[in-house]
Amino acid sequence: MDETEFWELIDAAREAAEGDPEEQADLLVERLLQLDPELVLDFARHFEARYNRAYHWDLWGAAWVLLDGASDDAFDYFRCWLIGQGREVFEGALHDPDSLADLLEDFDEEIDGDGEELGYAADEAYEQLTGTVAPDLGIAPAPAEPEGTAIAFENERALAERYPRLWERFKE
C-alpha cells in the first residue's frame, strides 16, 4: 500500500461517516477487512509513522487551544483525529499548526479532536482477519518528548500570540 492508497482509505471512511470520528473508525475497519492482512499492516505503518510525526510541541499547543486543554492522552487522540481529517489538513497542520483555523471548516468540541478509535482500526482489522495480534510494525517509536520547544500551555497570552488565528476563532 502506498501513501496515496492510505489517504484514499482515510478520506473515503471520513466522507462516508460525515465527519463522525467513531463512525469513521468503524467504516475504516470494514474497509480494512476487505484487504490482505499484509496490506492492513502497511496501513498501520503509514498511520503510525504519521502519528509519530505529529508528536510536536507546536501541534500540541494548537490542540490545547482547540480543545480548551489537552492532556497527554487527549493529545494522542487528537493526533489520531488529525490523521483522520486527511492529507491536506494533516500536512497543513504539521507545517503551520495555526493554519488549522483555516483548514477546519467546522469544529465541534463535542465530537471533533478525539480520534482514539481511529488509532485502533488497523489492529482491530488485523486481529479479525488473522485471529492474532498485529506484529511489531518495525517503525521507530515516537521520541520520549515531543519535537520542538516546549510551550507554557497555561499562559493564555503566549498561546494567543503563538496561535493568533486559532485563538481568534476558537477562544474569543
Image (cartoon, rainbow, N blue to C red):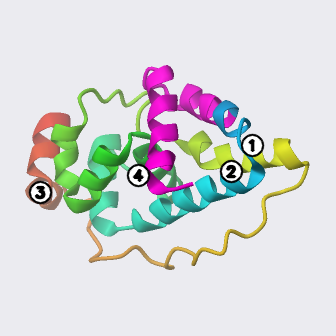
Question: Of the numbered discs in the image, which one, if any, rests on residue 70?
Answer: 4
- CB contact under 8 Å: marks 1 and 3: no
Q: Main secondary structure of the magenta part?
A: helix
Q: Earlier in the sequence, mark 4 or mark 3?
A: 4
Question: Of the numbered discs in the image, which one, if any, rests on residue 125?
Answer: 1
| Residue displayed at 50% across by 21% down | 16
- Which of the two discs, 4 and 1, sits closer to the camera? 1
Question: Of the numbered discs in the image, which one, if any, rests on residue 157?
Answer: 3
> Residue 112: percent from the left, percent from the top?
41, 33
- Which of the two discs, 4 and 3, sits closer to the camera? 4
Give 11 or 146, whichever is nearer the viewer.
Answer: 11
For badge 2, the amino acid type reads Val
As helix, strand or loop, the secondary structure at mark 4 comes to: loop
Report the magenta residues as a range.
1-29
> Residue 156: percent from the left, percent from the top?
18, 54
| Mark 2 vs mark 3, CA separation in Å | 44 Å
| Residue displayed at 61% across by 40% down | 117
Q: Residues within 10 Å of mark 2 (few under 14, many from 20)?
A: many
| Mark 2 vs mark 1, CA separation in Å | 7 Å
For badge 1, the amino acid type reads Ala
| Mark 1 vs mark 3, CA separation in Å | 44 Å
Q: In what quadrant of the picture does the C terminus appear? A: top left
